[in-house]
Image (cartoon, coloured by chain):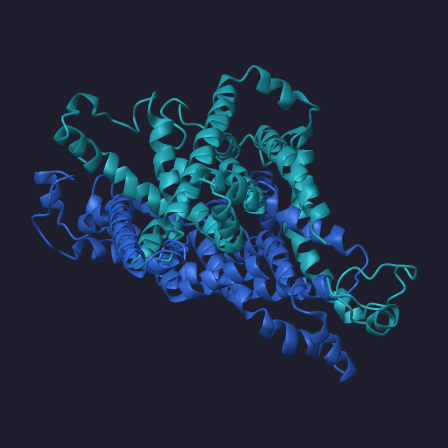
Chain colours: A cyan, B blue
């Protein structure tokens, strides 16, 4: 962005930020302390993340109870998944979760941001109200909603009062409703987060664009379609990745509410992986399930990352 | 964004008789005012309703936490309160072990936030302000570590901490939280630090400042908005974590508060006043941080978006 002349560039090369490319290539010398600045955090991350991750992949090829040494079994764990009906349920539920939790939180978060973007009196209170659940832990959120879902709790009481008494339900204990009953608290907490991301994005849009569109007689929908949405594309990319990552990670709220039950009806891959590994102590199969989660996440994240990095600087 | 002030609306051309113009202007502005009023009513109606709906569960948990067990048993969870007592809080705090759990949480969260941001700001500084070899690949690598689904790490990390002899200790939790979070903070801080104009740093170089001085005296102070925002965010995330805690810890008395809620849930089945009180205790610190840092949080996000 800053336009430096060639001589400026050479003089500043020792500390110039950014890719100082050009004919000299990598002629600049980086002070050793700066290298250490990168290496120390990298080593910490390598120790706690990259090294364990590699082990995770290796363990997925083994049969291991955590006590005797792991036994190499090749792809047997993956073959087992093909016939594992619980795995099928968990995979399906994870996809459902991604679509419902992810899709609804993006749409409703954008809607909330559009509604609350105007700098009106009192808008801060509304924003704070929607954002407040974001700071709660998913576990606390789960307990709050567990109380709401009790047979004598507020959800059923309200439904009875509205004349929908026939629909009252043991929401969390019914196989048909457990998954959806768990999504609601997760959404309650996620929408405010997505809203904040979009609010920041909307604020970054140049008002002159809207002025110009108004002069040209654009309707509100046209403004939204042709200015807001395109201008939000970078935020959309952020939101998309946040949603996918969060969906595949979702664990706490399910674990706290149903532990994946009843009869695995609200089982996600993440909860199935955890119970397989730490309750059934089938560490090899658990690792293989984790690899599946990784593969699901990887495709989307990697393609997004590559694009983001090509566009950035 | 509300640019529909009466003055801003086109009120006829300069031509025309003064009287007619006046009348038309008054008519148009009255019309605009009416429209604006209805707009305001619709806005506050819808936004207020949504906000109220959003706050209902919070109100429910606050009310439930201050009811007595007998009241809940007699009238049901969904009824209006017939009692007021802090007994639920007392039970959760002492018998339920929430006091110890809260201490554990703070012992884990505070050092983790400080160390993570220190390490991340160092790496972000180096990667954003110097032509470190492979800088983009390194940034990508560090970020990718944070994007990994934690599930792939759970088993190896629990075994790693066993090997290190820190399984079931808070050190393991601190270690893994730093390692897992640092990549994301590097990425955010890198984006922020890149936007700092190079001229500032060049001036310091000419004055003979080394990397360490540039880092501590120039870049860190300038990155304060981003650091404040990340402090609030990371505090919340680390404090609210459940998965890492139940992966590297086993003893109930060592659990941080989020994980201890699960214990409370098991220990006080259907004693909803105690469980609700426990949830309130677990949520209070992050709410305080949010309210305290709200300005920084929003400002940080917006600064990052504008620059």
> Toward the viewer: B56 or A138?
B56
From this view, report whether residue A237 is shown above or below residue A183.
Answer: below
Residue B228 position, x and y percent, is: 50, 66
Q: Is residue A183 above or below residue A51?
A: above
Q: Quadrant of residue A56?
A: top right
Q: Is residue B204 left or right of residue A117?
A: right
Quarter of image, res A111: top left
Closer to us: B212 or A224: A224
Q: In which quarter of the image is the C terminus of chain B?
A: bottom right
Which quadrant, please, contains the N terminus of chain B?
bottom left
Residue, x 17% and y 53% (percent of image)? B66
Query: Which residue sits at x=51%, y=58%?
Result: B301
Is residue A201 or residue B167 the one in the foreground?
A201
Q: How many labels does the image show?
A: 0
Q: Which residue is drawn at 55% across and 54% down?
A: B177
Question: In the image, residue B207 lies at what x, y percent?
Answer: 76, 85
Q: Which x, y percent locates residue A217?
A: 47, 43
């Amino acid at each position: 962005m800053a336009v430096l002349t060639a001589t400026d560039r050479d003089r500043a090369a020792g500390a110039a930020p950014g890719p100082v490319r050009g004919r000299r290539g990598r002629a600049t010398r980086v002070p050793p302390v700066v290298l250490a600045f990168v290496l120390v955090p990298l080593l910490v991350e390598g120790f706690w993340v990259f090294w364990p991750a590699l082990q995770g992949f290796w363990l997925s090829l083994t049969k291991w109870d955590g006590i005797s040494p792991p036994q190499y079994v090749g792809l047997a764990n993956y073959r087992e998944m093909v016939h594992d009906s619980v795995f099928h349920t968990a995979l399906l539920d994870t996809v459902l979760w991604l679509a419902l939790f992810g899709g609804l939180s993006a749409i409703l978060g954008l809607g909330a941001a559009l509604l609350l973007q105007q700098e009106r009196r009192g808008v801060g209170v509304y924003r704070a109200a929607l954002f407040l659940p974001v700071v709660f832990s998913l576990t606390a959120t789960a307990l709050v909603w567990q109380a709401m879902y009790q047979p004598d709790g507020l959800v059923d009481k309200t439904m009875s009062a509205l004349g929908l008494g026939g629909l009252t339900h043991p929401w969390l204990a019914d196989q048909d409703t457990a998954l959806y009953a768990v999504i609601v608290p997760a959404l309650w907490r996620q929408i405010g987060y997505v809203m904040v991301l979009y609010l920041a994005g909307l604020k970054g849009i140049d008002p002159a664009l809207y002025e110009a569109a108004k002069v040209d007689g654009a309707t509100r929908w046209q403004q939204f379609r042709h200015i807001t949405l395109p201008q939000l594309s970078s935020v959309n990319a952020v939101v998309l990745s946040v949603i996918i990552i969060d969906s595949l990670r979702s664990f706490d709220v399910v674990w706290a509410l149903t532990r994946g039950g009843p009869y695995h009806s609200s089982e996600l891959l993440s909860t199935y992986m955890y119970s397989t590994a730490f309750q059934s102590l089938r560490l090899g199969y658990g690792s293989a399930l984790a690899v599946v989660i990784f593969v699901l996440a990887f495709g989307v994240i990697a393609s997004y990352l590559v694009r983001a990095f090509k566009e950035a600087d | 964004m509300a640019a529909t002030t009466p003055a801003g609306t086109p009120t006829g051309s300069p031509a025309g008789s003064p009287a007619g113009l006046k009348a038309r202007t008054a008519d148009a502005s009255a019309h605009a005012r009416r429209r604006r009023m209805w707009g305001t009513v619709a806005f506050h109606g819808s936004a207020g309703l949504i906000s109220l709906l959003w706050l209902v569960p919070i109100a429910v948990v606050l009310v439930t936490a201050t009811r007595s067990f007998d009241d809940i048993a007699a009238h049901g969870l969904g009824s209006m309160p017939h009692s007021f007592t802090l007994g639920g809080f007392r039970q959760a705090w002492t018998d339920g072990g929430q006091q110890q759990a809260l201490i554990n949480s703070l012992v884990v969260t505070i050092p983790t936030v400080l160390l993570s941001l220190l390490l991340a700001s160092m790496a972000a500084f180096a990667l954003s302000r110097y032509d470190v070899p492979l800088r983009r690949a390194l940034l990508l690598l560090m970020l990718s570590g944070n994007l990994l689904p934690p599930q792939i790490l759970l088993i190896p990390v629990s075994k790693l901490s066993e090997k290190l002899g820190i399984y079931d200790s808070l050190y393991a939790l601190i270690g893994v939280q730093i390692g897992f979070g640092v990549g994301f903070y590097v990425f955010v801080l890198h984006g922020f630090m890149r936007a700092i104009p190079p001229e500032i740093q060049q001036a310091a170089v000419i004055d003979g400042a080394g990397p360490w001085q540039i880092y501590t005296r120039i870049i860190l102070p300038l990155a304060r908005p981003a650091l404040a925002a990340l402090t609030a965010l990371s505090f919340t995330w680390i404090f609210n974590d459940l998965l890492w805690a139940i992966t590297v810890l086993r003893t109930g008395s060592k659990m941080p508060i989020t994980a201890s809620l699960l214990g409370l849930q098991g220990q006080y089945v259907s004693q909803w006043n105690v469980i609700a009180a426990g949830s309130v205790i677990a949520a209070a610190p992050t709410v305080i941080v949010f309210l305290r840092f709200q300005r920084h949080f929003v400002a940080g996000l917006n600064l990052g978006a504008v620059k």
